[in-house]
Amino acid sequence: GRQPWSLVPKVTIDQNTFQSLWESLADGATLDLTLGELPSSDQVESLAAENRIYCMASGDLGPQFKFYFFGRDNLGVLHLAEVELEKASRRVTATVKSEDPADAQTFADSFMASLGALL
């Protein structure tokens, strides 16, 4: 059988790789949740990183934070996520794209779990 799914540590990819993959992959999963408190963008990035989900880029767009995250699983599959956090409503929406769409939801769930402390 398959080994249990997990994300691997110390993954790096460059911005060009991220961008070309993002443009070529289909949407695999989406997330929509509301946080109990508004975190700083650093907090979101460090919580994700503790779960081996790494931030490629982030920005403060005024009413919202925007992040691009990525992770690689133990089967070698790369997962990408575009995440928006609306400050006023504390609403997080995310789109996940994966090299293996079958695991996109698993990655989305993993990202959601990483925000557990804020829910």
Image (tube, rainbow, N blue to C red):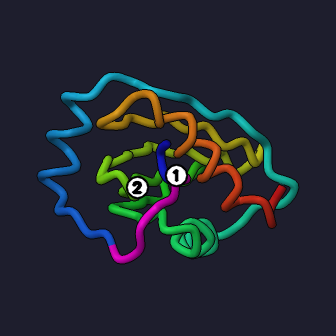
Q: Position of residue 69 (x, y in %)?
A: 42, 55
The kind of residue on which mark 1 rests is Trp
Q: Residues within 10 Å of mark 1 (few under 14, many from 20)?
A: few
Would residue 21 appear left or right of 62 to someone viewing this image?
left
Q: Quadrant of the C terminus?
A: bottom right
Do the CB atoms of the residues marked 2 and 1 lie less than 8 Å apart? Answer: yes
Placement of 67 over or under 28, stated as above or below = below
Q: Which residues are magenta?
A: 4-10
Query: For the point 74% across and 39% down, which residue is it?
Result: 33
The question of residue 93 being in magenta is answered with no
- Numbered mark located on residue 113 in the image: none
Q: Is residue 6 magenta?
A: yes
Res 73 label:
2
Q: Which mark is residue 5?
A: 1
Name, please, the residue furthest toward the front: 1
> Helix, strand or loop at disc 2?
loop
> Toward the viewer: 32 or 89?
32
Q: Nearer the viewer, residue 69 or 105?
A: 105
**Residue sitting nearer the eye, 51 or 38:** 51
Disc nearer the start of the sequence (2/1): 1
The answer for how far apart the CA atoms under marks 2 and 1 are is 7 Å
Secondary element at image label 1: loop
**Residue found at the far right of this picture:** 36
The location of residue 104, given as percent across then percent down, is 47, 35
User: In percent of the image, x 57 and y 75: which residue is there?
Assistant: 50
Closer to us: mark 2 or mark 1? 1
What's the amino acid at mark 2?
Asp
